[in-house]
Image (cartoon, helix red, strand yellow):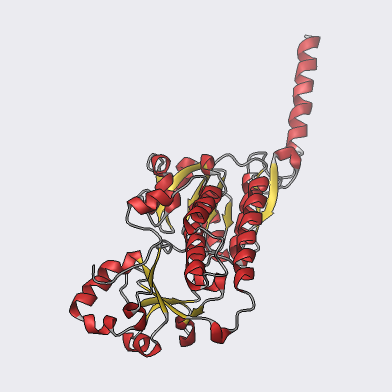
Amino acid sequence: MKKIVVLMLALTLLLAACSAQPSGSPSASGPGSSSPANGLRTVTDCTGRQVEIPEVVESIVCVNVGTLRFTTYMQATDLVIGVEQNEIEPRISKPFSYINNALFSTLPVMGDNGTTYDEEIVKLSPDVVMAAFDKDAADALQKKLGIPVVAIAVIDNMFDKASYDTIALMGEVYGRRERANELLTYIKGLEEDLRSRTAGIPEEEKPTVYAAGISFKGAHGFDGTEANYSPFVAIGAKNLADETGQTGAFNIDLEQVLQWDPDIIFLDFNGMALINEDYAKNPDYYNSLTAVKKGRLYSQISFRSNAVNAELALADAYYAGKVIYPERFKDVDPVAKAEEIFKMVLGTEFYDTLKENGCEFKEMKIGE
């Protein structure tokens, strides 16, 4: 009987101790505390939100443009447990999804192009949702799911603070800081190399250049161009589209291109079918351009597919530099440089795959 009384007393004390915990205290498995005792930590995402996530993140889903791409760059595909529908379809202009299609095609679909299938995400129960959302959208999604949502910016340039911040943030969230530092050091090194090669060239001595066939919201022909075109910006090229006051990709009046009469024209492979189709209808227009008459037409491998695929844009920048400023890039083999970039960013060489699919660095002809 004494033993029973002692046991009952001990049980009473234990229950009293448990009930003494404040009602607002978080559980060990839920968000709400950065105390090491419950395995949580706080990160600041790209919108400035404070988000509490597990001390060790073991599973994620990636929502909207760029999150899965940058996760691949971070060599963290082992954490991904669900993908968007558009990431399952392999495209040569999206190397990260093309290379990882064997994995991505086997994973559950939990959204498409930023539209989330909330029930599917809750079923998957990832530790963290990575989302290219603004602050309000990220807060709303986190409230609906009851799962930490870490937001990154939608990135549409080859080099910018948002891309660097995203790499650093993912390194922190995924516990891959060493990879983040490696990638940041490498990309910033390329940026400085490209900038320094063309530094000091007077604007009046630079050839004028025009990029045609640029993709945005689908394929475009010769009128599809881009201001602040990332490969040209990186090498300080004299991009005629910048003179329009436009930003990003847009359609231009072809008569304006004729008036400019660019010294060098670069053609995006994605637009070649439309360019050749238009050439068949209006060959005189194209044949009156100096660059066409002199054979100064060169390729650009399409890098704009669900925003910028940085590794392709970087490779294009070195090839464009070799064409526009041959003396400044005389030590560069564009193919070898492309493979170096692909190996570092994607983890594998990719140029031969591009070439097999009709995309390579070469002189171009219109009408073939």
| Quarter of the picture holding the N terminus | top right
Q: Nearer the viewer, residue 161 or 259?
A: 259
Q: Is residue 314 left or right of residue 221?
A: right
Q: Is residue 212 left or right of residue 17?
A: left
Identity of the residue furthest to the top in this view: 1
Rendering coords of residue 61 (x, y %): 50, 47
Rendering coords of residue 180 (x, y %): 64, 51
Rendering coords of residue 328 (x, y %): 57, 69
Q: Residue at x 64, y 65 (%)?
A: 192
Q: Residue at x 54, y 51 (%)?
A: 340
Q: Is residue 169 left or right of residue 211?
A: right
Q: Is residue 87 left or right of residue 344?
A: left
Identity of the residue furthest to the bottom in this view: 259
- Asked whether residue 29 is in view, the answer is yes
Q: Residue at x 32, y 68 (%)?
A: 271
Q: Nearer the viewer, residue 114 or 125?
A: 114
Q: Nearer the viewer, residue 192 or 34?
A: 192
267 lies above or below 61: below
Rendering coords of residue 162 (x, y %): 60, 64
Q: Nearer the viewer, residue 77 or 131?
A: 77
Q: Residue at x 35, y 74 (%)?
A: 295
- Asked whether residue 118 is in view, the answer is no
